Image (tube, helix red, strand yellow):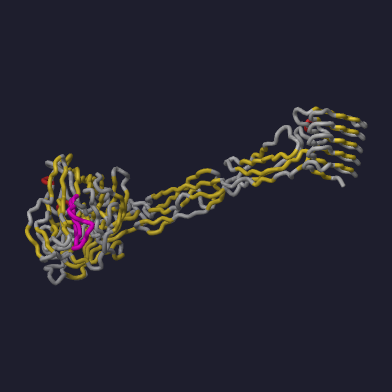
């Protein structure tokens, strides 16, 4: 069995109502009515056949199932007893009090589909809020399943629109219980005071506020739960499908009338008639049980109503009146300026009690304001020119501006103080349009390293405050610039002066270190320099330090027999083992004998005989005579005119010798 767009309610027993304003369904009998398929349609014969299959059933444990059957190419459940071939319906309707204009209700249910439920891409509603009067064709609000097995939406169709508008999109999963709670505030015609917000599985209400939420000429709305989907022959993704619901509920959250002092009963406020008389009329269906009539006998007659002590601000102005077969056509002015319909025909048969939206008004100063009704004529069907007024309502603008701010911004530091960042934000008000935005800190400010909050604030004409915020994060991801000392060749091993690296950083002062040993060995040592800034960015570089055998006995390797001469001429004779012989100054004679030796003549004209072994011989400054014995020797005559004799019996290296 596949599921396409079914709604099941978990309802068993009777309505549980905590008050007259709340109701929770417990079974099919909890609802005002039910709309169940009573026919099946066959595309083969293009005919409808009566059918008594129970599409809506109590499943026990508080669960109700709404099932619709679909057999492509054969037959499918219809829409009640109608001959609509393109839709199927299994719905219940009405739970608790009906919703009126300017009221806030919450409708909720916990629902799930069968495991193979798939949306076909045609309309597929599992909840509707529909008008019972006026324009009751299109629903005002729907909860719908989209194409496939993941997308769902809460949408509304106000009288100002030609189709549905999405208030919130969310995901669903087949065969998985999901709680949906809808907060709906209705408005009167033309007023942007409605809302549709949805909570899914207990998350925050999300959607739209400050929008028109009405159907034309409608004053009464009731909820519907069930499956209502579009079909046609050849659909392969749907079949016999259902949705189950638990604890469907309707709760009247509030009736949101204008605040005290902004509701002006026509029969109670100062008025002045021109060309005709006025009379208070009694009718229990009017506000306060009374309404005011201008007993006009032709075009041009008028009446002025004074709305006293109105605070400065922005308001939606509405008017309730009693329409009737004996009514005229009027025009309306506020403080001399036209407002509302150019010609309002108050004729109706039978009589009615509409509330119309006249417009949004901005009153810059507190005080009295005058509404004038002027008779233009009458409908040919009307029996009189009478003008009607019941109550004038000024609904204060309480919707703050909506701000659009940047996403959180991350920038690279440009100096020790951080970075200068530019940004912008906009604000739009449902009454005033674009309004100025104040940013704190302002755009172009210097932001320190780390996170800083920017708060955007906007006020509309009525003083409603809107705020949004975003975060600016200044980061330092750029490593310091490291400058190395030059590579050096030295003849001292104990903490020689190898120079100092330096480093600079845009955002801070880095710390420079190296891994140089306290005591260098002969030959090449690679010293790694490291610069680290406070953000942890690292720069490294390598310096080459070459240590030659000179006059520093600390350069002698561990284990060598160290022999050190003086600044005078010396005769220095080594041993048969490894020797380290340093002549220092003077004209020295050095004989190493055997072993792997390190021999340094130092300053002076020296005679050096390396002997047997792999020897390192450095003549130093002066005119030296060097004789390298058998082995692989490294010979450097040094400055001066040197004579070097190196037998070719090993891998030898000779420098600074002719």
Residue, far bottom:
380
Q: Taking the image as drawn, is residue 395 in sight?
A: no
Residue 339's quadrant in the figure?
bottom left
Task: Count the numbered circles shown.
Answer: 0
Does the magenta portion include 236? yes
Residue under the image location 11 percent in, 59 percent down: 40
Q: Is residue 120 left or right of residue 59?
A: right
Region of the chain picked out in magenta, as a range = 214-242
For image coordinates 29% across by 65% down, the residue present is 338
Asked if residue 631 is among those painted magenta in the image, a careful observer would answer no
Between 68 and 319, which is closer to the camera in this rendering? 68
Q: Position of residue 357 (x, y in %)?
A: 25, 59
Residue closer to the observer: 538 or 197:
538
In the displayed structure, would residue 630 be above or below residue 355? above
Which residue is drawn at the image coordinates 46% and 49% (left, top)?
408
Asked whether 591 or 320 is in front, the reply is 591
Work out whether 594 lies above or below 383: above
Residue shown at 32% from the left, 49% from the top = 206
Can the viewer see residue 623?
yes
Residue 169: percent from the left, percent from the top? 31, 53
Classify residue 610 by image quadrant: top right
Q: Horizontal placement of 552 versus 76: left or right?
A: right
* Residue 55 spot, x, y in % from top left: 12, 51
């Amino acid at each position: 069995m596949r599921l396409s767009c079914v709604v099941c309610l978990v309802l068993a027993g009777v309505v549980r109502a905590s008050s007259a304003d709340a109701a929770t369904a417990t079974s099919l009998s909890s609802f005002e009515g039910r709309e169940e398929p009573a026919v099946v349609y066959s595309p083969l014969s293009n005919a409808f056949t009566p059918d008594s299959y129970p599409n809506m059933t109590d499943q026990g444990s508080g669960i109700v199932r709404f099932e619709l059957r679909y057999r492509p190419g054969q037959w499918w459940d219809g829409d009640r007893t109608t001959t609509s071939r393109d839709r199927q319906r299994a719905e219940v309707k009405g739970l608790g009090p009906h919703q009126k204009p300017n009221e806030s209700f919450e409708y909720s249910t916990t629902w799930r589909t069968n495991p193979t439920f798939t949306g076909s891409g045609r309309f597929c509603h599992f909840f509707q809020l529909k008008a019972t009067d006026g324009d009751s064709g299109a629903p005002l609000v729907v909860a719908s399943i989209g194409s496939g097995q993941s997308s769902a939406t809460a949408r509304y169709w106000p009288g100002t629109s030609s189709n549905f508008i999405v208030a919130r999109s969310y995901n669903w999963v087949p065969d998985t219980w999901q709680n949906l709670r809808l907060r709906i505030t209705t408005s009167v015609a033309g007023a942007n005071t409605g809302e549709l917000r949805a909570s899914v599985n207990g998350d925050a209400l999300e959607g739209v506020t400050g929008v028109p939420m009405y159907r034309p000429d409608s004053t009464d709305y009731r909820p519907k739960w069930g499956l209502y989907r579009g079909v046609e022959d050849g659909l392969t993704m749907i079949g016999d499908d259902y949705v189950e619901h638990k604890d469907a509920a309707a709760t009247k959250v509030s009736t949101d009338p204008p605040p005290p002092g902004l509701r002006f009963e026509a029969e109670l406020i100062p008025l002045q008639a021109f060309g005709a008389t006025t009379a208070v009329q009694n009718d229990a269906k009017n506000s306060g049980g009374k309404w005011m009539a201008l007993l006009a006998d032709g075009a041009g007659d008028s009446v002025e109503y004074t709305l006293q002590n109105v605070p400065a601000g922005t308001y939606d102005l509405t008017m309730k009146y009693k329409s009737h077969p004996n009514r005229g056509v009027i025009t309306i002015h506020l403080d001399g300026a036209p407002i509302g319909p150019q010609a309002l025909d108050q004729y109706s048969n039978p009589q009615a009690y509409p509330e119309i939206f006249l417009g949004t008004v901005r009153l810059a100063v507190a005080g009295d304001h005058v509404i004038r009704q002027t008779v233009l004529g009458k409908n040919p069907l009307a029996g009189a020119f009478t003008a009607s007024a019941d109550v004038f309502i000024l609904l204060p603008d309480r919707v703050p501006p909506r701000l659009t701010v940047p996403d959180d911004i991350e920038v690279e530091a440009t100096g020790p103080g951080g970075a200068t960042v530019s940004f912008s934000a906009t604000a739009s008000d449902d009454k005033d349009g674009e309004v100025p935005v104040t940013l704190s800190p302002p755009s172009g400010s210097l932001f320190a390293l780390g996170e800083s909050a920017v708060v955007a604030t906007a006020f509309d004409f009525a003083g409603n405050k809107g705020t949004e915020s975003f975060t600016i994060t200044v980061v330092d991801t750029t490593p310091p610039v490291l400058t190395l000392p030059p590579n050096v060749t030295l003849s001292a091993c104990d903490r020689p002066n190898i120079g100092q690296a330096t480093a600079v950083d845009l955002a801070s002062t880095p710390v420079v270190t190296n891994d140089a040993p306290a005591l260098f060995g002969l030959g090449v040592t690679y010293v790694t320099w490291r610069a680290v800034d406070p953000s942890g960015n690292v720069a490294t570089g390598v310096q080459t330090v070459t240590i030659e055998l000179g006059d520093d006995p600390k350069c002698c390797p561990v284990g060598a027999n160290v022999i050190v001469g003086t600044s005078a001429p010396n005769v220095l004779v080594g041993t048969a083992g490894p020797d380290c012989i340093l002549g220092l100054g003077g004209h020295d004679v050095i004989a190493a004998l055997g072993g792997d030796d390190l021999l340094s003549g130092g300053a002076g004209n020296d005679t050096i005989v390396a002997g047997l072994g792999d020897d390192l011989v450095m003549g130093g400054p002066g005119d030296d005579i060097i004789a390298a014995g058998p082995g692989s020797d490294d010979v450097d005559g040094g400055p001066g005119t040197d004579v070097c004799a190196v037998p070719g019996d090993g891998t030898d290296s000779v420098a600074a010798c002719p």
